[in-house]
Amino acid sequence: MQRIGVFVCWCGTNIAGTVDVVAVAEALKKEPGVVFSDNYQYMCSQAGQDLIKAAVKEHNLTGIVVCSCSPRMHEATFRKTAAAAGLNPYMVEIANIREQCSWVHKDVPTGTEKAIILGKAAVAKVNLNVPLTPGESPVTKRALVIGGGIAGIQTALDIADAGFEVDIVEKKPTIGGKMAQLDKTFPTLDCAACILTPKMVDVAQNEKIRIFSYSEVTEVKGFVGNFDVTIKKKARYVKEELCTGCGACTEKCPMKKVPNDFNLNMDTKRAIYIPFAQAVPKVATIDADYCNMLKNGKCGVCSKVCAAGAIDYTQKDEFISEKYGAIVVATGFNPISMDKFDEFAYNQSKDVITSLEFERLTNAAGPTAGKLLRPSDGKHPEKIVFVQCVGSRCDACNEKGKEYCSKICCMYTAKHAMLTRDKYPDTDVTVFYIDVRTPGKNFDEFYRRAVEEYGVHYIKGMVGKVIPDGDKLIVQASDLIAGKQLKIDADLVVLAAAIEPDKSARPLATMLTASMDTNDFFTEAHPKLRPVESPTAGVFLSGACQGPKDIPETVAQAGAAASKVIGLLAKDKLTGNPCVAQSNEMMCNGCSTCERVCPYGAITYEDKEFRMPDRSTLIRRVASVNPAVCQGCGCCTVACPSGAMDLKGFASEQIIAEVDAICK
Amino acid sequence: MSNSKKYLQEELIRISGVNPKKCMRCGKCTATCPAYDEMEYHPHQFVYMIESGDIEPLLESESLYKCLTCFACVERCPRGVEPAKLVEAVRLAAIRKQGNNRLTANDIPELIDEDMPQQAIVSAFRKYTK
Amino acid sequence: MKFSYFPGCTLKNKAKDLDNYARKCAEVLGVTLEEIENWQCCGGVFTTAKDEVATKLSSVRILKDALKKEQALVTVCSACHNVVKQTNYAMQNDKEFAGKVNRYMAEDEYNGETQIYHYLELIRDVIGYDKVKECTVNPLAGKKIAAYYGCLLLRPNSVMRMDDPENPSIIEDLIRAIGAEAVVYPYRNECCGGYVRLEDAKLSDKKSNAVSESAKKAGADVIVTACPLCKYNLEKSGCEIPVVYITELLAEALGVKEDTNE
């Protein structure tokens, strides 16, 4: 028989406001096995923990029930307390009477009744708990960073700086991401390329970092400290190790009409290309959709002009298997499609563009060599209208946009407006806004400068419709302060399109068993206290894959993710979770059902010799769980038709005891 | 807010099925409204005034009869507020009062010509008369 | 292929061409339109208020009749289509409203089961533009035609689901299928002023003019519409180019247009 102590926490008024904690402690005192029961204001405080430790000693407790907040919050705390008092930490159970009780009920009688029931269930379970000892597993001291934008670059550099090897997998032919496409950066207006490309070079030259460009992660197996990852290196039809990046092929390729995605298809490139001058790796890639040689075997010009002999039309996709201890997701963002917002006439006029397209139009390496010219006729625009919040802050039921604020648009629009007025003082610039949101160091000052020093017109109101009319765009909008409907003749309209996570994020999350929110942003382990960790152990988050972010925030988060990775890789061994599945070999009928449902590949089958009562031996096929790989998800325990699979710490009889206690 | 105002507000919200609290005050409805010039109160004001209970001026306003029910504001509202449905609810509240019919059968002969489609007349009756 | 057909009041009177040519063209394209018996006027506009029940009963009767015959329902007039489709949507999605309506109805409950096609959707989704091309005996080559959608066909899109409400192409695709040139102009989905003509003719003139000027500026020879009130408003406001029904234009291409109009 266990000797159980019950500790009811008030959590200030969080619990005590709607739960009569004294009554709960009294009621649970009468439960079987309970020899001690008490309540305290903050059980997680040092004094609260001391109270638990003293009770363990004084009453020779063998098990503990803490009625408090969610186990996600303080289970680890109380397990440590138990261990310090000489108890096995797995003899502790938490009854969640805060999130699942006091916070969701309004009146004290109901809250108290439910808290008692939850406490009884926990007591019933502890009565059946047995001490558990976690196993250990080694750590592969290498990290994988998925995504080679500024987030991935910074994370990789910081991890490498601590002496660990890092691989970056980037799906495009070069690292650099969105930042490489930007012109200047707010609020200091340094040129994006000037601050990014040295970091890209650092990555290329760092001996600890390998870049898999034009590559994708296709499979992830294993667990924290021991991930097995398959990387697909897509055929680029150029031998990376031979290509010198001289660019002769990209000049001579006769296929000139390939949309240039780096410039958002506002100009063209050749079928063999290097995305931009400072690309890393500086290696050419053939676009198989346009290359005549690959399509119909007629051409071969690039091969003829390549002095290095790097062209290989027979190259195939290559699959590489690597082991890592930690994985960082840095898959970034994209502007949303404007297809569903054609009241702004994006699909009806070339002179309605997105803000990212505007970046390319003002970038010296862009399609207009940095001159701000209208895409339709190459004329200098004299009147530009910027529209904020296109597709951001939409109603949840609205099938067109995103519910969240995209966060970066207010600042980049202020930047665009200011730079336009600075470079082209004759150009009239109007910004339509709903709210101007500029929290950030020197951000609001920056926006005010755009208005006060550069004379940008900010109008509170939204644009309702853009009407292409000859070579003009009639912008029909609200001026809510003046109480007017405006019709402005503009030459160029720039839409601050909402941003969304990259489309590759969703399948990647499935591979990593990492959770996502409804918008496909990766979820943090804790929104405030563990912002760069995913709830899946060993998977970390960097940059806009977790939520909209500007560059300073992304870089800060990238460093934070790196430090978490370094903390993990610095360990030689990891303590595992003892709550893993185990198979009762006497009951196992060898059907393989559990093996098929296990998402972690933790179950194998072996032929085992059994001694029969008549002293004969019998060879039977039975399931065996690798405790280092098992994550304790419990799929196998419900799938097993003979009831042979059980989960340590969550055994079927323990769960049934809890249910019985609740229904009693 | 007085009880009678509150009752009217609740009634309008109920029959329109619109929740004016969803409005984020962007003014896109008014930006897009084709009858803007003819209206005294504009779509965003209908939403705001109903939300704040200031409904009397709307009931009296000619704006009620200028809305073209073209659904442009409904289509383009990023918050799914559907201002036209609120305008319609206020219009109904106005014309449902005894003696408040905007259009009667006697007015028709003067308003029509021989080409006018039946559709125009039945629609006008739906909108202006109870 | 047989479909239930609801012409509506205007098509029996001032807009006979819209109706007449819709039937003729359908026959050429291999579709029979069976007119619903004893239908009543849909009311011309959909009253969005949830407590307006009686005004929507005629539409529900039409929808129920089609269901009884196990046929999809075809409409031509933009206004009828909007009213019937919005009513059907309310029957599907507003349980309280549907309950009230069903208490007025004899026989079985109706919950929005009938499928509704606008004539344009019938051509695009059932008949196909290829069939139209095949049946075109008199291609309207060289004709520059501006499609006028107005508001009722497209909005609210969450209910109508006909096309992109801001940049539609369903009429232009049909224009191209009969060999003519489609003129795309920015005001094609703006309102003509509708029934407000009775209340404020100036407002209606202003709105209609914006549409016709925009079409003219884009180089159109003719404007096509599926709505009798749009046609009337454009014509009354002094539109300088002819406004014809989409079915009339189709009839010309399919060779079933009568020589003397009226």
Image (spheres, coloured by chain):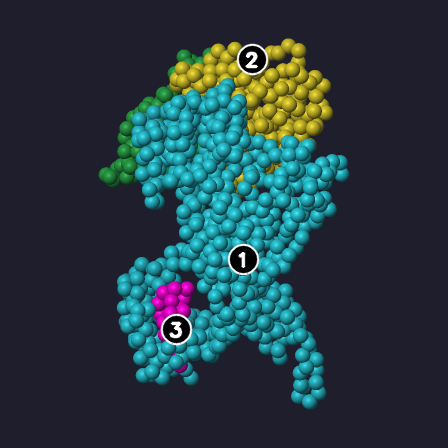
Chain colours: A cyan, B green, C yellow
When the figure is inspected, residue C123 is found, relative to residue A525, above or below; the finding is above
Number of marks: 3
Give the CA separation, mark 3 to mark 2. Answer: 86 Å
Do the residues bearing badges 1 and 2 touch, measured as CB atoms within 8 Å? no
Q: Amino acid at mark 3?
A: Lys
Q: Residue C256 sits in which quadrant?
A: top right
**Residue C214 in view of the camera:** yes
Q: Are marks 3 and 1 on the same chain?
A: yes
Q: Earlier in the sequence, mark 3 or mark 1?
A: 3
* Label at residue C242: 2
Q: Amino acid at mark 1?
A: Lys
Using the image, name the chain to which the residue with label 1 belongs.
A
Q: Nearer the viewer, mark 1 or mark 2?
A: 1
Helix, strand or loop at label 1? It is: loop
Is residue A73 located in the magenta-colored stretch of the structure? Answer: yes
Is residue A135 located in the magenta-colored stretch of the structure? Answer: no
Q: Which residue is mark 3?
A: A80
Using the image, name the chain to which the residue with label 2 belongs.
C
Give the magenta-colored segment's residue range. Answer: A62-82
* Label at residue A208: 1
Q: Amino acid at mark 2?
A: Pro
Q: Residue at x 34, y 25 (%)?
A: A484
- The furthest residue to the bottom: A615
Which residue occupies the foreground of this view, A442 or A16?
A: A442
Q: Is residue A323 left or right of residue A185?
A: right
When the figure is inspected, residue A639 is found, relative to residue A263, above or below; the finding is below
Q: Is residue C199 left or right of residue C122?
A: left
Using the image, name the chain to which the residue with label 3 belongs.
A
Q: Nearer the viewer, mark 3 or mark 1?
A: 1
Q: Which corner quadrant holds the N terminus of chain A?
A: bottom left
